[in-house]
Amino acid sequence: MKLLLVEDSGRLAVALTSSLRDEGYVVDHAADGRLALRQLEQHEYDLMILDLMLPEVPGLEVLRALRRSRAATRVLVLSALEETEDRVAALNLGADDYLMKPFELAELKARLAALARRHTGQTTHLLSHGELTLDTHARLATVRGAALPLTPKEYALLETLLRERGRALTRTALFGRLYDGLSEASDRVIEVIVSTLRVKLAQAGMADLIETRRGFGYRVP
C-alpha cells in the first residue's frame, strides 16, 4: 500500500516513516501543506496520514482539495487539536478517522490496517486465490500451507495484484505502488520482479497466476 505522510515535525516524520516502511508500506513524506498538494497531484495514494496544523497550507485545505479531486485515498488525521469541533470539521470534510496526539504506535498501525481493508473492500487480513493465501499482517505468502520465500518487493507486487484482482496494472502503475517518490530506480525493475516472482510461483505449482496483457499490463484473473 502506498501512503503519504503529511507531518511538519521532522522527528515524528522520520520515526513514522521508518516504522511504517518496516510494516511494508511505501511511504512518501510532505513536510508542509503545499508540498502535500503537489504530491497528491503527481501520485496516487491508497492512504494518507494528515496533520492539521501545517505550514504553507492548513491540513483542512489539503483534505478539501483531496476530496474535490474525488481520489479514493483513505485519510487518517493525526493531530494535537482536541476540540470536538476540530474532529467534526475534519470528518465532515471527508477524513476517514481521527487520532489524537500523543498516540500509541500500535493503535495508529491498527487504524491504518482497518482503513486499508476498507480501501480494498476486505473484511479480514487474509487474501486468497485458490491454494494461495497472503497474510497481510504477517506479510507472508503460502501455497497449500507452505511458505513462499518472497523478497519484500515480490510480496508487495503479489499483494497489489491480488488486491486489484481482475484489473490490469501497467508497469508504471505498479512501480508507483512499490516505490516511493524519491526512488532513482527505473520502472523496468517491475519486469524483473514479475519474472522472479513467476519462477517462485511456478515452483509452487501456480505458474499461470500472473497474466501479461500486452499493452495493458499485468493482472491476476
Image: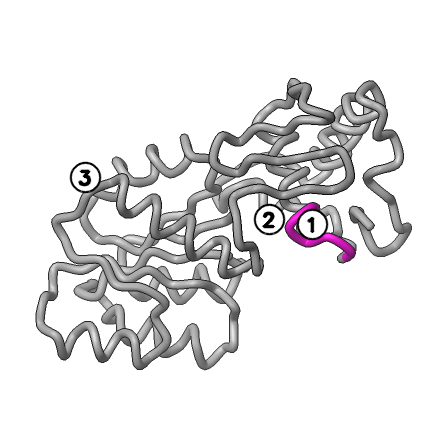
Residue of label 2: 176
Kind of residue at badge 3: Arg
Q: CA distance from mark 1 to mark 3?
A: 32 Å
Q: Are marks 1 and 3 in contact (CB under 8 Å)?
A: no
The image's mark for residue 35 is none
Q: Which residues are magenta?
A: 162-166
Residue of label 1: 172
Which of pointers 3 and 2 lies earlier in the amino acid sequence?
A: 3
Q: Are marks 1 and 2 in contact (CB under 8 Å)?
A: yes
- Give neighbour class at mark 2: few <14, some 14-19, many 20+ (Cα, 10 Å): some
Nearest the camera: 153 or 172?
A: 153
Q: CA distance from mark 3 to mark 2?
A: 26 Å
Give the percent coordinates (x, y) of residue 71. Answer: 52, 71
The image's mark for residue 11 is 3
SS at badge 2: helix
The residue positioned 78% from the left and 39% from the top of the image is 130
